[in-house]
Image: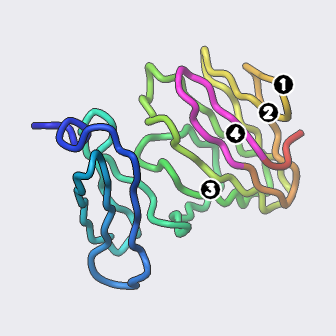
């Protein structure tokens, strides 16, 4: 199977047509005056499958409508829930663990939104060899605590490195 980039080459411009509420969506690429289109139809749970840089189809979130998963217990991030929003609703501490790349091979750019929506503490724990960058140049291999009634975004940069933005302690 050929990779999309092998067929199209270096992509110099692209556009996305997403205005329709139902039916097919189109992603158009322009490369050396060659136009290629990738058309898809989102599923009811608002996910689509697009090729990654290796040509493998991966499921990605659709627009700004990322699925919301309510957490009431500890959680380790998994690839099947990439690009979701975790809504943490519990009166006791919830620990969210970020596994290393050898355990879960997240694609670069994978993102999780985490909302702390209760009086408890939500702690994001870095797994073995995982680095979480926060607030300027600070890094941690330990944990990050989300402030009450705030949200953070956790984005995978590659090589076991994650960036966390939002209100953290």
- Mark identifier at residue 86: 3
60 sits to left or right of 123: left
Q: Give whichever of discs 2 and 4 has the lower sequence position.
A: 4
Instruction: Give percent across and percent down for residue 24.
Output: 27, 76
Which residue has dot 2 on it?
134
Cα distance in 3D space between marks 3 and 4: 12 Å
- Mark identifier at residue 138: 1
79 sits to left or right of 138: left
Magenta stretch containing residue 41, yes or no? Answer: no
Cα distance in 3D space between marks 3 and 1: 24 Å
Quadrant where the C terminus sits is top right
* Relative height, residue 128 to residue 123 (above, below): above
Q: Nearer the viewer, residue 26 or 108?
A: 26
- The residue shown at (24%, 38%) is 55
Instruction: Give percent across and percent down for residue 142.
Output: 76, 22
44 sits to left or right of 107: left
Quadrant where the N terminus sits is top left
> Which residue is the extreme one toward the bottom?
21
- The residue shown at (38%, 83%) is 20
Question: Nearer the viewer's eye, disc 3 or disc 4?
Answer: 3
* Relative height, residue 139 to residue 7 (above, below): above
Circles 3 and 4, Cβ within 8 Å, touching? The answer is no
- Mark identifier at residue 95: 4
* Relative height, residue 108 to residue 159 (above, below): below
Q: Give whichever of discs 2 and 3 has the lower sequence position.
A: 3
Mark 4 neighbour class, 10 Å CA radius: few under 14, some 14 to 19, many 20 or more: some
Query: At numbered mark 1, what does the secondary structure look like: helix, strand or loop?
Result: strand
Q: Give whichever of discs 3 and 1 has the lower sequence position.
A: 3
User: Magenta span covers which residues?
Assistant: 153-165
Cα distance in 3D space between marks 4 and 1: 21 Å
């Amino acid at each position: 199977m050929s990779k999309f980039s092998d067929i199209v080459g270096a992509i110099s411009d692209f556009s996305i047509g997403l205005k329709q509420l139902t039916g097919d969506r189109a992603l158009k690429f322009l490369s050396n005056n060659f136009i290629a289109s990738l058309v898809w139809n989102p599923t009811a749970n608002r996910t689509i499958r697009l090729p990654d840089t290796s040509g493998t189809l991966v499921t990605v979130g659709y627009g700004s409508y990322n699925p919301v998963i309510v957490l009431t217990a500890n959680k380790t991030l998994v690839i099947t829930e990439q690009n979701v929003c975790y809504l943490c609703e519990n009166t006791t501490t919830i620990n969210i663990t970020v596994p290393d790349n050898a355990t879960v091979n997240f694609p670069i750019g994978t993102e999780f939104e985490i909302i702390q929506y209760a009086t408890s503490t939500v702690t994001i724990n870095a797994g073995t060899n995982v680095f979480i960058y926060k607030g300027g140049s600070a890094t941690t291999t330990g944990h990050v605590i989300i402030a009450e009634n705030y949200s953070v975004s956790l984005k995978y940069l590659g090589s076991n490195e994650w960036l966390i933005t939002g209100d953290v302690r």
